[in-house]
Amino acid sequence: MIRPPARPAPAGTVYFSLLGPLTAVRDGRPLPLGPRKQRLVLATLLARPNTPVSVDVLTDAVWPEDPPRTARKNLQVYVSAARALLGSTGDSGRDRVVHGCGGYRLTIDEGELDTLRFRSLARAGRAAHERGDLRTAARLLREALDLWEGPPLNDLRDSTGVAEEAERLEARCLTVYEDWAETEIELGRAAVAVDGLRDLVERHPLRERLRVAWMNSLHQSGRQAEALAVYDDYRQLLARELGLEPSPAMAALYRAMLGRGRAARPAAAGRDTVRGTALPAAPRDFTGRREELRELLALLGSPDERVVVVSGPAGSGKSALALRAAHLLGDGFPDGRFHVQVRREDGSARTPAEVLGELGRLCGVRVPTAAAVPGVPAVPGGSAIAAGSAVPADAAVPADTAVPAGPEGGPAAAVSREAADAWQRWLALHRALIVLDDVPDEAFVRGLLPRSGPSSVVLTARGQLAGLAPVHRIALGALADGEALELLGKLIGPGRLRTDPAAALRIVRACGALPLAVGVGGMRLAVLRHLPLAEYADRLGDPSAALDELVAGDISVRLRMASGWQDLSADDRRALGRLAGPAQEGGFTLDGAMEALGCGERAAIRTVESLIDAGAVTSPAGEVTAHAALYEVPRLLCLYAREQEAG
């Protein structure tokens, strides 16, 4: 659709549009513009209104490679057709297209050409902004943008000359869009610009000003995690494509969003800055957890929070949340972001000395090895010893620093004192983010946590790690139905999800809405394209078959449940097996626990709270008396516990 001129034009006047396909209307009726070569000449003249256009420029636009010998004569024919279409200029009766020493000049007014109207509105909008009239500026800039019908001259871009003119027009549009978005952000109306900025960034990924406006609009709209992701994606794109870093201004904005403003920490004199990253790939199907992610990012951006515990039952997405945050934080930790898996593939815990040795290798800190102690076996992969680590003497670790003990208090404890001292000295001088994934208990990590300095540690654990203080805790439970369905849709496709939404909902609920189980179920369905959702929902609804169905390749939900089961004490395993029955029926009360366990009130409370500490039982988020509380066990853990009880 061609937009009419903003100011009424005399009857019979032609109105041209370049901001989209080349079009013209007279008195509201579209005009035929002739064959393609004629339209190329007209477009080139209109793209340079009131300015001489040389014959060579017109020739290149129409015949970019091999112009015929009759090119000039043909151009004269096309220009004559343009004159007939345009008519004369007002009362003077003079032709609109005249030939002079500089070439052909097209005379046209603002009300007759959308690009001139666009330029006038943009200029007026910027002037209003300069005098502080932001509302008028936003309105005028929006009017300018509303003239656009799509990529300029998009029907003629196979001509190199016209394509170059179109790109210049598009660059002006982008600049005006940035002006408008920034003005709306200043007015506190960022939400109106978010979607448009996202679309433009996708088409122009290296345009930094667009990225900055998008970051600001997301941040002002309360979507901080997404705002930080915009920066991190751009930083990686620049590094990959151009070998560059974002501008200092954009980096300063990023730090401000992390809560540090301009107070980026200066490098300590003489220290060896490590700018490494050792993170697994960001989870591609990360879904939901928006509030938890926002909270985690805010905590890690605060100088007062050094340790955050992310807890939840097996399969609740603890690792995915921690890794998502670590990837988003980017340059917030200039000395590196590092991930260490605390368990082996079989689910057994590594020794603290092994974990500390890996941290030393990743972070560049020279950690004493067990070989330095007579009678103690060397730590596998341990770093070279270093009493002469290049660390100032005033960074010494307090004498009461806790040391990670070896298995059962074994010989690893004897070597860990020196190792922990070296590690703490490094933490005192660096700002790094450490993710310790799947921690078995508090004793394992006490000597690894920072006592001073700006580094932060995220611990993921099934249990609450109640013995650690002071730390901030984020507890994960099941996903909301909508989030679980979104995750399933990412894996099987939204179209298939829509074929039977009721069955899809049964599937995610049968999975306990745990990200691991929903993900495994989705991967299985993605392979079994023939399997109706309703049939798979029936299979998962069968308590005796559900865990058998939640296997995809080498990923098994049952094996993950088994690992969590082995973490429990023998007493807790027996208790959970007895509670699995009532828990399966929608939760249990304290009276139900007393009946299932065959014990009194005090013993039942201690048992239930022990299971809560271990992450096997969830309790209400708000304060409620023990008798009024409804306790729950994740459905799949219930099924596994019942298998063990029967077995």
Image (cartoon, rainbow, N blue to C red):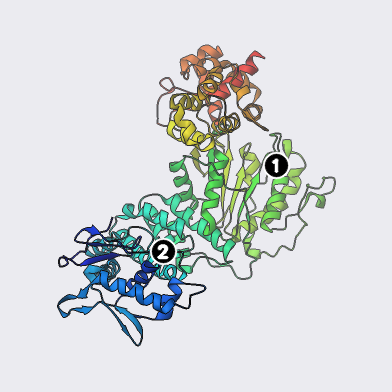
Element type where label 1 sits in the image:
loop
For the C terminus, the image quarter is: top right
Q: Position of residue 424 (x, y in %)?
A: 64, 55
Mark in the foreground, 1 or 2: 2
Q: Which mark is residue 325?
A: none
Left or right of 539 on screen, residue 562 = right
Say what amino acid the circle numbered 2 marks. Leu
Task: Say whether residue 58 is visible.
Answer: yes
Q: Residue at x 69, y 49 (%)?
A: 356
Q: Quadrant of residue 27?
A: bottom left
Q: Residue furthest bottom?
A: 101
Query: Relative to the observer, which residue lies in front, 559 or 452?
Result: 559
Left or right of 501 on screen, residue 456 = right
Say what amino acid the circle numbered 1 marks. Ala
Query: Relative to the observer, which residue lies in front, 433 or 625?
Result: 433
Vertically, is 321 above or below 579?
Answer: below
User: How far, Cα to Cα, is label 1 from label 2?
Assistant: 73 Å
Q: Position of residue 371 (x, y in %)?
A: 82, 50
For the N terminus, the image quarter is: bottom left
Q: Residue at x 41, y 54 (%)?
A: 199
Element type where label 2 sits in the image:
loop
Q: Position of residue 55 (x, y in %)?
A: 40, 80
Residue at the spot of label 2: 156
Residue at the spot of label 1: 405
Q: Residue at x 52, y 54 (%)?
A: 329
The total of numbered circles placed on residues is 2
Q: Residue furthest right?
A: 375
Q: Earlier in the sequence, mark 1 or mark 2?
A: 2
Category of crowding for the residue at label 2, using alpha-carbon neighbours closer than 10 angstroms: few (below 14), some (14–19), many (at least 20): many
Vertically, is 366 above or below 133?
Answer: above
Vertically, is 499 above or below 454?
Answer: above
